[in-house]
């Protein structure tokens, strides 16, 4: 499971079992998506969560939809309320839902009905170490990821932590769909380089749409 560097970008989308890369799929909606994230963050602010081990994550996070991914001393889980406010997370904007469903369909997953989105904000230097996403109930559903703002290098391993990760450059507007065997791949984000993007400023935003509950 070691795709060649750059290969995916040569085609409009390329699949390994379960992976679709959709370069620029969200480009025409970038500005509306960033505006929607800013509005959501008014209700449920970005915050840097602590890992169960007590470290502060370098990416700041918020959520929308029926549940939110949270991490604290008790562990990782999906919670129906924002622990900062005790209130339900903001509703998922229709724009988000339709983008995620459309991307999933383009990537070969008809009928994806995400019930939440985790929103990550990376300021320069922030990263995400290699991990698997295993807190969701339904692994038959794909995960759809939308990149906005500053570029980043996505690290894409295999089913074992020891698999040497491939690197994929992600630009604003790029969309990835992960399902099937790829759903449980180790993955991460290399430290984001300094820079300024016209829509997000000195930040990269990533939306991941999931079927969590
Ligand atoms: C492959 N986010 O939130 S998105 C995460 O760019 C996360 O913020 C990264 O990993 C980011 O958990 C990467 C791409 C992604 C998301 C989920 C996956 C790739 C995935 C789940 C399984 C396999
Ligand atoms: Fe992840």
Image (cartoon, rainbow, N blue to C red):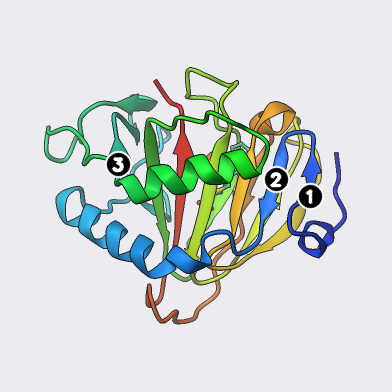
In three-dimensional space, the C-alpha distance between marks 1 and 3, rounded to whole angstroms, equals: 28 Å
Which quadrant of the rendered structure holds the N terminus? top right
Tell me if residue 55 can be seen. Answer: no
- In the rendered image, residue 168, in percent from the top left (x then y), is placed at 72, 59
Residue tagged 2? 20
Tag 2 or tag 3, which sits nearer the N-term? 2
Q: Name the residue under label 1.
A: 14
Q: What element carries label 3?
A: loop
**Quarter the C terminus occupies:** top left
Task: Kindly indicate the quadrant of the structure image that contains residue 38.
Answer: bottom left
Q: Residue 92 carries which label?
A: 3
Note whether ligand 1 is within 8 Å of mark 2.
no
- Dot label at residue 123: none
Instruction: Confirm or deny contact between disc 1 and disc 3 (CB under 8 A).
Output: no
Rendered residue at 29%/46% (across/down): 93
Residue 56: % across, % down: 38, 48
What secondary structure is found at the residue carrying circle 1?
A: loop
**Above or below — where is 176 with respect to 76?**
below
CA separation in Å, label 2 and label 1? 6 Å
Above/below status of 41 relative to 88: below
* The image quarter in which residue 178 lies: top right
Q: Do the residues labelled 3 and 2 touch (CB within 8 Å)?
A: no
The residue depicted at 70 percent of the width and 45 percent of the height is 20
Left or right of 46? Residue 6 is right
> In the image, what residue occupies the spot 60% across and 64% down?
24
Sooner in the amino-acid sequence: mark 2 or mark 1: 1
Q: Can residue 12 be seen in this view?
A: yes
Tags 2 and 1 touching, CB below 8 Å: yes
User: Are there few (<14), some (14-19), or many (20+) residues within 10 Å of tag 1?
Assistant: some
Q: Which of 121 and 75 is in front in this view?
A: 121
- Label 2 neighbourhood size at 10 Å, few (<14), some (14-19), many (20+)? many
* Dot 3 crowding, Cα within 10 Å, few <14, some 14–19, many 20+: some
């Amino acid at each position: 499971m070691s795709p060649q560097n750059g290969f995916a970008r040569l085609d409009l989308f390329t699949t390994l079992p379960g992976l679709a890369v959709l370069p620029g799929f969200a480009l025409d909606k970038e500005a509306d998506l960033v505006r929607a994230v800013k509005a959501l963050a008014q209700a449920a602010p970005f915050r840097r969560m602590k890992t169960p081990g007590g470290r502060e994550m370098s990416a700041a996070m918020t959520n929308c939809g029926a549940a939110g991914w949270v991490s604290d001393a008790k562990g990782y889980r999906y919670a129906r309320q924002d622990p900062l406010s005790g209130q339900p997370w903001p509703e998922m904007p229709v724009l988000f839902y339709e983008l995620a469903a459309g991307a999933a369909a383009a990537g070969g997953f008809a009928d994806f009905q995400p019930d939440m989105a985790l929103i990550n904000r990376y300021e320069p230097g922030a990263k995400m170490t290699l991990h698997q996403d295993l807190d969701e109930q339904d692994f038959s559903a794909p995960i759809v990821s939308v990149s906005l703002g500053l570029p980043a290098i996505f690290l894409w391993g295999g089913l074992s932590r020891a698999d040497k990760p491939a690197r994929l450059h992600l630009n604003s507007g790029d969309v990835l769909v992960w399902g099937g065997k790829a759903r449980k791949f180790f993955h991460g984000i290399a430290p984001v380089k300094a820079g300024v993007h016209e829509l997000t400023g000195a930040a990269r935003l990533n939306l991941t749409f999931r079927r969590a509950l």
